Image (cartoon, rainbow, N blue to C red):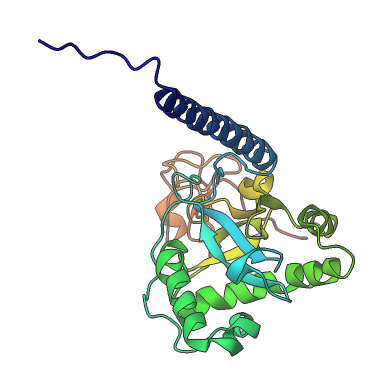
Amino acid sequence: MVQAVAPNGNPAWRRRICVFCSAAIVLVSATILGVVIWEAQNADDSETMKKPMSCGSAALCGVLALESGLGSGLYHHAEPSVHGLWPETPPYGSSRCIHPKSKVAPSSLPSCYRNQEAAKDPEHEKEFVDHEWTKHGSCAGTSNGKNYFQQICNMSEEPLKVIAAGLKKSHDLHALVSELENSNFSVHEIDPEFGQIMLSACAVADANGNYVWKLVAEANFNESCSSGGPTPSPPAPPTPGASCQAGLRGPTCQTDADCKNVAGCVRCAHSGYCTDQPISVVV
């Protein structure tokens, strides 16, 4: 039987071993470098990422997502724009998902989505709006798609003006956040990769049961958007008693005779209840 002999003396074999070792070293080094980069990126993001949003006693809470235009790809554009209104349902927060009364999407582009991107590719922008309605509007509690986007446009108008003014001074996302906070808008989270800023918001039901959203700091959700039940009715007056006592109504009556044999009662008052108060006679 011929036994295999380890080719230790073969220079070509040694070269293969060296090449393999070099490749392994490069792979390990790249892996370590990747881990370091990943940790560095996540360390930066941890400064901006927030824990899941707590609605407190509000039924609905979420974020108004704004695009600064400083992001990459479709998120890189000359002017700031609104992305959408997102209820922070689990796992992003404790918001309920309240379906709209009508699932009909708007037939045309909402005013605040008629931007430069829409002019370049209106079909894509319409698909984007439909996506926002289907994914996020389905849990926002509004009456319909038109109302959902009307609220988005109304809420985003002022903060977008602040961002536009800030971009004239700086193209740093954190500087834009400071501009918004100085204008009393509460920033819940930022997305550095796509240049997005999320403002905290909550909603409260109107008289018709449709939810109205407003920009509110998370700490003030309980005060501004409490989802307590309907306003309680005023307490009923005390049930008339079987006797007449000071400050209390007696039993019902039509004539003084109805109160004659009731303890403490002297007559039937104009209110239709027996009373212990005699008629005052002015001389």
In the depicted structure, whether residue 38 falls above or below residue 249 = above
* Residue at the image point whose x is 59% and y is 71% from the top: 74
Give the side of residue 80 with respect to residue 49, left or right: right
Depth check, front residue: 8 or 190: 8
Give the side of residue 92 with respect to residue 194, left or right: left
The location of residue 254, given as percent across then percent down, is: 42, 62
Q: Residue furthest right?
A: 169
In the depicted structure, whether residue 65 falls above or below residue 79 = above
In the depicted structure, whether residue 192 falls above or below residue 110 = above
Q: Residue furthest left?
A: 1
Total number of numbered labels? 0
* Residue at the image point whose x is 42% and y is 28% from the top: 12
* Residue at the image point whose x is 36% and y is 75% from the top: 103
On the question of residue 169 being in view, the answer is: yes
Depth check, front residue: 32 or 223: 32
The location of residue 275, given as percent across then percent down, is: 54, 49
Depth check, front residue: 201 or 203: 201
Look at the image and tell me in which quarter the C terminus lies.
bottom right
Image quadrant of residue 242? top left
On the question of residue 270 being in view, the answer is: no
The location of residue 32, given as percent across then percent down, is: 57, 29
Depth check, front residue: 186 or 2: 2
The location of residue 259, given as percent across then percent down, is: 44, 50
Look at the image and tell me in which quarter the N terminus lies.
top left
Give the side of residue 179 with respect to residue 264, left or right: right
Image quadrant of residue 199? bottom right
Give the side of residue 253 with respect to residue 118, left or right: left
